[in-house]
Image (cartoon, rainbow, N blue to C red):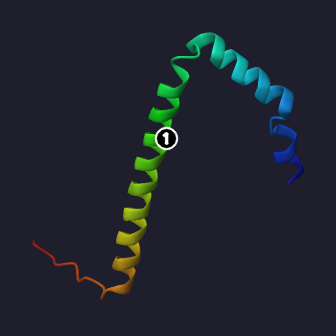
Amino acid sequence: MEILLLFSPGPPEIILILLVILIFFGGKKIPELARGLGKGIREFNSARASIETEIKDGMKGEPKKIEDKS
């Protein structure tokens, strides 16, 4: 647990990262980047939830027999 705390960014590092983003992308581009990031996270969570549901449904059902086609 102590190792994770060692590598977590503190307030000065977060401020520095935000300043670098502001310098590289400018104030007008940041909302567009945030929207794209939010959309990507939403799509990822939706896909993850559908996969979890599919796996849980598969575990509830009867085991499928594997047919030998040879």
Residue 24, image x and y in percent?
60, 11
Residue 37, image x and y in percent?
49, 36
Q: Relative to 59, is 12 on the left or the right?
A: right
Residue, x 45% and y 49% (percent of image)? Answer: 42
Work out which quarter of the rendered image holds the N terminus and state it. bottom right
Depth check: give the residue in front, 18 or 55: 18
Depth check: give the residue in front, 29 or 62: 29
Residue farthest along the front direction in this orientation: 28
Q: Relative to 55, is 62 on the left or the right?
A: left
Residue 69, image x and y in percent?
10, 73
Residue, x 85% and y 35% (percent of image)? Answer: 10
Q: Relative to 26, is 47 on the left or the right?
A: left
Above or below for 57 versus 5: below
- Find numbered disc 1 in the image and state the secondary structure of the residue it sits on: helix
Q: Amino acid at mark 1?
A: Gly
Above or below for 41 versus 58: above
Residue, x 52% and y 27% (percent of image)? Answer: 31
Residue 61, image x and y in percent?
32, 86
* Dot 1 alpha-carbon crowd within 10 angstroms: few under 14, some 14 to 19, many 20 or more: few
Depth check: give the residue in front, 61 or 29: 29
Q: How many numbered badges does the structure rendering display?
A: 1
Residue 39 placement: quadrant = top left
Residue, x 48% and y 45% (percent of image)? Answer: 41
Q: Relative to 52, is 20 on the left or the right?
A: right
Which residue does the numbered mark 1 point to in the structure image? Answer: 38
Residue farthest along the left direction in this orientation: 70
Work out which quarter of the rendered image holds the C terminus and state it. bottom left
